[in-house]
Amino acid sequence: MLSVTEKAVDALAQSLDEAEAKDDQSLRLSRSPRGEYGLAIDQERDGDQVVRQKKRPILLIDQEVSNRLDGAVLDLIEAPEGIRLTLRTEEARPTS
């Protein structure tokens, strides 16, 4: 299962607010045929992993993407180009 930090959830909720999404809409994390991940506004489907802020669904992840990203973390980081979302996988984590 993909883990999502509180900072990332807050940023995603703000994006939904700015997009003026309807109450039954959330952001969906999906994977393109080229292997790139992206976000789009969508509605919840059976089998989705649902990340909530309080009771509000914020992020939807279908079972295939959730399995592929098992153990990864979606986080908000400060980069030279500004604050952005990032996916950290096991391979990207420093070893002790």
Image: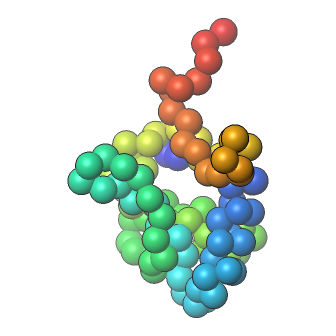
Q: Which sits in the foreground, 80 or 56?
A: 80
Q: Is residue 25 visible?
A: yes
Please tell me whether residue 20 is drawn above or below residue 88 in the rendered image. Answer: below
Q: How many marks?
A: 0
Q: Position of residue 49 (x, y in %)?
A: 49, 60
Q: Is residue 52 visible?
A: no
Residue at far top of view: 96
Q: Quadrant of the C terminus?
A: top right
Please tell me whether residue 52 is drawn above or below residue 1 in the rendered image. Answer: below
> Horizontally, is 40 left or right of 65 in the view?
right
Q: Residue at x 68, y 55 (%)?
A: 8
Q: Which sits in the foreground, 68 or 20?
A: 20
Q: Position of residue 14 (x, y in %)?
A: 71, 72
Q: Residue at x 61, y 13 (%)?
A: 95
Q: Residue at x 31, y 46 (%)?
A: 35
Please tell me whether residue 10 is drawn above or below residue 80 in the rendered image. Answer: below
Q: Residue at x 45, y 78 (%)?
A: 42
Q: Which sits in the foreground, 82 or 47?
A: 82
> Horizontally, is 36 left or right of 78 in the view?
left
> Horizontally, is 74 left or right of 40 in the view?
right
Please tell me whether residue 83 is drawn above or below residue 11 in the rendered image. Answer: above
- Display coloring: rainbow
Q: Position of residue 80 (x, y in %)?
A: 69, 41
Residue at far front of view: 81
Q: Position of residue 44 (x, y in %)?
A: 46, 76
